[in-house]
Image: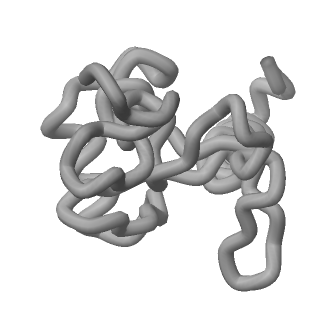
Amino acid sequence: MPGLPVGTAGRGGWPYQGRHGAGLDPRSGAADRLRIGGVPVARLYRIDEVVNELQLGRATIYRLIARGVLPTIKIGRSRRVAEEDLHAFIEALRHQRQVTNEAAGTGVTQ
C-alpha cells in the first residue's frame, strides 16, 4: 500500500505476516533472534511446508500433531513446527527403524 513503511501489511501498521510467520520482517534480522522457551528457533515451518518436507498427507500430519508426536507452536490461529522439532521427529523415526531392524535380525540401518 502506498505510504506504508516496508514490511507492514496495512492494518494499523502491523508487521508483515506473510510467509515468514510470527509477524517478523525477514529484512529486520528479528527472525535470527526468535526464541521460544529460551531456546533459539532457526525456522518455523507452516503445516503445508511440513507436508512437502515429509511427503506425507495433510491429514497424516494433523493426526501426528493431535497425538502429540509432532509438537507445534500456535501463533494466533496458525500452527508452526519448529525446525528442531521436525528434525527430532525424523531422528526418532530413524531410531525406531534401526531398533525394529535390529530386533528382526536384518542388521539394516539405512
Q: Quadrant of residue 109?
A: top right
Figure check: 6 above or below 72: above
Identify the image quadrant of the N terminus.
top left
Residue at x 32% of width, y 59% of height: 65
Front-most of 101 and 42?
42
Q: What residue is shown at x 37% (from left), y 42% (from top)?
A: 17
Q: Position of residue 96 (x, y in %)?
A: 66, 48
Q: Residue furthest left?
A: 59
Residue shown at 47%/64% (left/top)? 71
Query: Where residue 30 sits: x, y (%)?
Result: 73, 51
- Is 59 drawn above or below residue 63 in the view shown? above
Please identify the quarter of the rendering in which residue 26 is found.
Answer: top right
In the picture, measured across the screen, residue 69 lies left or right of residue 28, that is left
Instruction: State how many labels appear.
Output: 0
Q: Is residue 9 visible?
A: yes
Left or right, residue 31 beside residue 9: right
Query: From this viewpoint, which residue is outermost toward the bottom?
Result: 37
The answer to which of 96 and 102 lies nearer the viewer is 96
Here the colouring is: one colour
Q: Residue at x 74, y 56 (%)?
A: 41
Would residue 99 be visible to someone looking at this image? no
Find residue 87 and report its horizontal and vertical position in percent.
70, 42
Quarter in which the C terminus is drawn: top right
The image shows residue 81 at horizontal and vertical percentages of 49, 51
**Residue 58 vs residue 102, the one in the foreground:** 58
